[in-house]
Image (tube, rainbow, N blue to C red):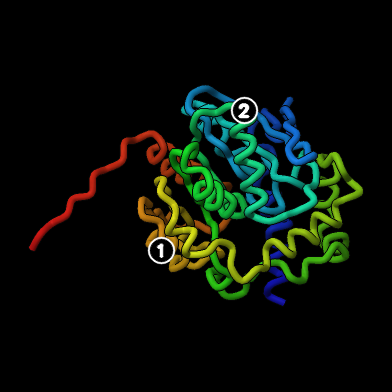
Amino acid sequence: MKIRRYSLLLLTVFPVLIQAQGKIDYGSNNGKYLTLNKTRIYYEEYGKGTPLLLLHGGLSSIKGLSTIIPELSKHFRVIAIDAPGNGRSEQANEVSFISMASYYSKMIDLMKLDSVYVYGFSMGGIAALHLGAERPDKVKRVVVHSAVNHLNGYNEGFAGTPDMTPEIVEKEAKWWLDGHLKRTPQPDKWKKYILDLQKMWYPEEFISDDKLRSIKNPYLILQGDQDLIKIENALHMHRQIAHSQLGILPNSTHFSLMEDPDAVLNAIVPYLTRKAKKVFNFEY
């Protein structure tokens, strides 16, 4: 099935592309834990300045952001987080984009952060949409990279992971599983992790238009022109979020973080650091 082919693409191609990104082993570099809802969440910090939460994609971890952490840490206080069940974080009892955003919201409060920027890729981008909507008091600006708001926003051939079972992972992506088991503090729960992903990645709607329209903080909707996600989906989210901008990376797929991290950084850093441009209304 095409769906299965793309599911395994995320399991195989994505981790291969993030191998050996410099001397620092991001995701395994003396991080810290916070306990939220009886779940230990792992994170690492780099740099100084305005806090910038980095939220990785699915089937990944902090390590998946290795290509952009060094440059971002020159401008911000980077707080890279392993999502529940991913990397070195423990598995949560409930897994959804709303609950994931709730974890990040509680981290902001426990760390006593006055305000934050947020960058979310793919799965992390959907969580970032919910986080910004729920915490306008803390979230200043958000970059949503290669995220989708509705199941029909995917290009033909990719529609979640309904057939990515633990058995398929063991058979066709065992090397990914071996890497996951080396990091997770709960190796006996990896099958639950896969089954939870199936449920979380296959709803009809990831975030409603009403909730998108409720967002008041500035957003950058960013994706590749050859992404797994339709450009029309990015345009739709841009039109729903009042204070948003739209960025399309040329000649880029869902793996632009590895293909051309400089292009991603050239979009992220100026957007988060510059003052908002005025919008002029012309009368005819």
Residue 11 locus on image (x, y percent): 73, 57
Q: Estimate how packed mark 2 is, as few (under 14), some (14 to 19) or many (20 or more) residues with alpha carbons within 10 Å.
A: few
Give 44 or 214, whichever is nearer the viewer.
214
Q: Total marks drawn? A: 2
Question: Is any atom of residue 255 visible in this view?
Answer: no
- In the rendered structure, the answer to whether residue 4 lies left or right of residue 229 reads right
Question: What residue does disc 2 label?
Answer: 111
Viewport quadrant of the C terminus: bottom left
Residue 283 locus on image (x, y percent): 10, 59
The earlier-in-sequence mark between 1 and 2 is: 2
Give 258 or 52, whichever is nearer the viewer.
52
Tell me the residue at 80%/47% (across/down): 91
Question: Is any atom of residue 206 visible in this view?
Answer: yes
In three-dimensional space, the C-alpha distance between marks 1 and 2, rounded to whole angstroms, equals: 34 Å
Residue 92 locus on image (x, y percent): 78, 48
Please state which amino acid type lies under the numbered disc 2: Met
Q: Is 7 situated above or below 84? A: below
Please state which amino acid type lies under the numbered disc 1: Leu
Tell me the residue at 89%/46% (across/down): 187
Which disc, if any, is residue 141? none
- In the rendered structure, the answer to whether residue 149 lies left or right of residue 161 reads left
Examine the image and state in which quarter residue 126 appears.
Answer: bottom right
Which disc, if any, is residue 235? 1
